[in-house]
Amino acid sequence: MAASDGQPAVLMDGVTLERQPVRLHPMKGGIVVARPDGGSERLRFETLELVSDLPDRTILGRADLPDWRLSVAPPLPIRQRRRLRRSGQPSPSRRLARATIILLMVGTGALLWLRGGMLLERAAPHVPLSVTVPLGEAIVEQVAGGRFCATPEAEAALARLLARLQPEGGHAEPVVVRIADLGVANALAAPGGQVLLTRGLIEAASGPDEVAGVLAHELGHVEHRHATELLLRNAGMAILLSSLNSNLANFADTLLQTAMSREKEREADAYALAILARAGISPAGLVAFFTRATTESADASPLVRRLGNWVSTHPPAPERLATFRAAAARARGTTPALSASDWQALRSACGPPLQDPPAGS
Amino acid sequence: MSASGAEGEPRVHFAGRAGPFLLMQLWRAFLSVITLGIHRFWWKTANRRRLWEETTIDGDPLEYRGRGIELFKGFVIAFLLVFLPLGALAQLPQLLQLSGASEEALVSAALLVPLVLLPAIGLLLGYAVWRARRYLLSRTAWRGIRAGLEGSGWRYARLNFAMLALKAVTLGLATPYADARRWNALWNDARFGTEAFRAKLNWGPLFKPWLISLGLAVALVLVPLLLALPTLMGVMGAAELPAAGRVPAVAPWLAMLVPFIGFAVFLGVVTLILPLAFVPWRAAFLSAAAGATRLGDVGFAFAATRSQWLRYLLGNAALVILTLGVGALLLPWRQWAFWITHLRIEGVLDEGRIRQSQLAAPSHGEGLAEGFDLGGI
């Protein structure tokens, strides 16, 4: 081969900084690199790599000499470039592995996105009582503003009512029911079995069955750990790790303002009807409570104003009322939720009642 | 200062085009999102490979030999060895409190944890910078010869920590001295093949530009803030009065907007106005630093004028604002283009003397720097 034949290229051997002008000649399955000193090297395409595919040149490397570079200008024909493996490109099996990993990750991400709720549902019961009870107690304290109504007679009455409203096998979390001295009519189920009723709720009710119905509904939330699940969903791990002495107003807000999903309300309803039936208390009270319009009383605390009243946060959707009415129609052999004296004790828990009970429904 | 090549082109030349780069960024950004961020290591690698490839020195392109998997491994290692333990340590006081530890234990934890964490993080920052630079240089080659960083990352980490402390103690006045020492320390460790870089930056001439920039920053930021403060407070205060039933002043929604407006203004000031104030400093520093750095017989210069700096920074701001943030993807390209376009070299390397680097290249890279989000290209 004449020294001036072939394609000019520049060889950088990766040992020194010198640029050696060389000439390339094609050979079967590779190229021949002819150096100016007369020596030449035969390189097969399998040992060559495509390092850089630039518009004005092609830069080749060698698998066996990682620092060796051959700069070819003008660029090699596309046909030849395609034959070369690109440096740094993974082998087909690696690419398959990589694609699988990516698919798995995307799949997991999608799964979490769509079904994350189920995970939370499973997780909520496993949060230990040592965490949920103090959290629930603190939230209840926050909502009630520290103002509770408690007389020994009222406590005893509540205890008897709770005993009647037991499901098979007892409550999921030990239940503590307290009465907040607030005028608005509301009830709240906080984590850790902490249930809060307001004075306004008891005063707005025309009979013990109504209070029992609302309480049964809240116990449904307790049973299914809805409050814990809601907080986990919205506040995440922060609530579990945060100091339990800090201000929990924002968690109380979350609990109060985030509407429970319809499904959760249905679950609580079903549970309520079940334990009411088991206790022999008529759901008619709950129906009456819903259908009678309750007015909001003007309480100073903005937290309580946001509380709204129980009916406004548990809208009496037609299907719910229909379910309750049907259950009320089926109820047989029911007795009032509380005895007359217990009911009186409950109504006097916060001192003398501010208003006479409205005409019985 | 620069001797140009045969065709009158500058010896250091960047041939990249913004359009194709932006397209690549959009694609890689999308990949990063659907892989929950894992792809960013390959993204960074692809960026570097593209930018290096399109940069030629004396006709031959730079080459980036890094691989995404190396960055990924580096991050995983840094996460397991550094971030997880430090994070756990940071949570120690809260964990103790939750598990009902004694009063003394809580107090000693609250005191000891910052005492351990702050120096640890301070040192690790410098170490991360050095290690990241070492990875980057070891994966950069020109004409087949690899660059590298030789020395001790911990030595640089200690220097960096000391300089940070010095800057803090002197309220920033020691910055020219501190930054000059750090520049020299890093570049004196740098190698190209068997040739060493030498950096002898003097901080003296840099003090005046630093003062100018500080003064500008104060003027541009503090003064408007102080002027606006009474108005801001007036608006915010007026919103609280209606609750007490007195002055029916500013509508509540407007008053609620004030913190957001304030935050947006603050963000705008920090990202757009403050950098402009520091143009005199950055221009002077980079120019002096390049001039004080040599590689064998080759000297460097960074020739950007202050107005060119201003146009560059304002261009960045306009790009990001007018594209509602999408244009930020182009910022690495603009930064690289700015540096390379204004970089000059003079002299030639001794081909007879320089040999291939014998430094062992690290097998994975930049995990710490990535975790500390130290930025860069």
Image (tube, grey):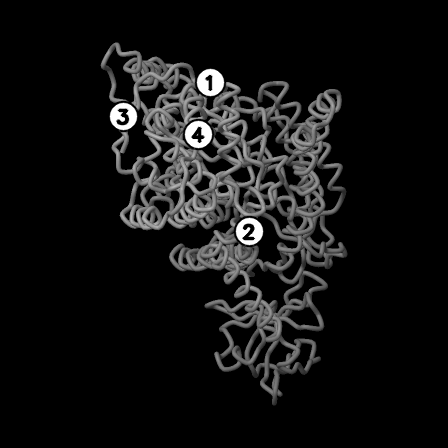
Q: Residues within 10 Å of mark 2 (few under 14, many from 20)?
A: few
Q: Residue at x 50, y 63 (%)?
A: A107
As helix, strand or loop, the secondary structure at mark 2 comes to helix
Residue found 36% across the figure and 17% down from its top: A353
Q: Nearer the viewer, mark 1 or mark 2?
A: 1
Q: Nearer the viewer, mark 2 or mark 3?
A: 3
Query: Under tag 1, what secondary structure?
Result: loop
Q: Amino acid at mark 4?
A: Ser
Q: CA distance from mark 4 to mark 3?
A: 19 Å
Residue type highlighted by circle 2:
Arg
- Using the image, tell me which numbered label, if any, was put on residue A122: 2
Q: Position of residue B89 (x, y in %)?
A: 70, 35
Marks 4 & 2, CB-CB < 8 Å contact: no
- Residue under the point 69% across and 81% down: A40
Which residue is identified by label 4? Answer: A339
Residue A147: mark in rendering: 1
Mark 4 and 3 residues: CB-CB less than 8 Å, in contact? no
Mark 1 is surrounded, within 10 Å at the Cα level, by few (under 14), some (14 to 19) or many (20 or more) other residues, namely some
Q: CA distance from mark 1 to mark 3?
A: 25 Å
Q: How many marks?
A: 4
The amino acid sitting under disc 1 is: Arg
Q: Between tags 1 and 3, which lies in front?
A: 3
Identify the residue under disc 3.
Answer: A358
For discs 4 and 3, the disc positioned in front in the rendered view: 4
| Dot 1: chain letter | A
User: What is the C-alpha distance between the residues marked 4 and 2?
Assistant: 39 Å
Secondary structure at badge 4 equals loop
A178 vs B148, nearest the viewer: A178
